[in-house]
């Protein structure tokens, strides 16, 4: 299974990579912010995205909501927790 990980904390992100690769997942990409995440999703077509939704620059999910309002929806299901 191809996974993209998005987390602004390098230590936490790399720990997840090591953990997931250790159990057989293919980590297709790593993102440190929302824009990198969206670019990776478009280019890598992962099966799964594990994302911290409060990442730079806005530290909120507003970037994803804005893209959806502008008709540029992410190509993955997105449902933030309230």
Image: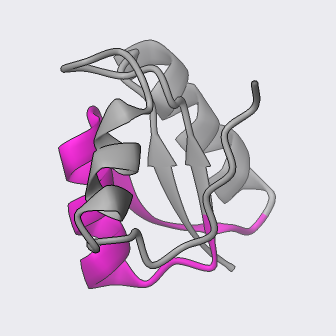
Task: Give the position of the N terminus as an image quadrant.
Answer: bottom right
**3 and 70: which is toward the camera:** 70
- Report the side of 31 relative to 54 (left or right): left
**14 and 50: which is toward the camera:** 50
- Report the side of 26 relative to 6 (left or right): right
**64 and 5: which is toward the camera:** 64
Regarding residue 31, the answer to whether it shows in the image is: no
Residue at position x 69%, y 50% in the image: 79
Regarding residue 18, the answer to whether it shows in the image is: yes
User: Residue 73 sits in which quadrant?
Assistant: bottom left
Does the magenta run of residues contain 53?
no
Residue at position x 61%, y 48% in the image: 50
- Report the side of 3 relative to 74 (left or right): right
User: Residue 41 sits in which quadrant?
Assistant: bottom left
User: Residue 70 sits in which quadrant?
Assistant: bottom left
In this view, 76 is above or below 17: below
Residue 60 percent across, percent down from the top left: 41, 21
Report the span colored magenta.
24-48
Farthest residue in the right direction? 23
In this view, 16 is above or below 29: above
Residue 35 percent across, percent down from the top left: 19, 47
Residue 65 percent across, percent down from the top left: 40, 46
Residue at position x 28%, y 57% in the image: 67
Residue at position x 35%, y 80% in the image: 44
How many marks the image carries: the answer is: 0
Farthest residue in the front direction? 69
Task: Give the position of the C terminus as an image quadrant.
Answer: top right
- Identify the coloring: one colour
């Amino acid at each position: 299974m191809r996974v993209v990980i998005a987390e602004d904390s390098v230590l936490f992100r790399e720990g997840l990579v090591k953990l997931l690769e250790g159990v057989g997942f293919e980590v297709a990409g790593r993102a440190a912010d929302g824009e990198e995440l969206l670019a990776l999703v478009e280019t890598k077509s992962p099966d799964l995205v594990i994302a911290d939704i409060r990442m730079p620059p806005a530290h909120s999910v507003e970037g994803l909501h804005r893209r959806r309002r502008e008709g540029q929806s992410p190509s993955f299901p997105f449902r933030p927790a309230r």
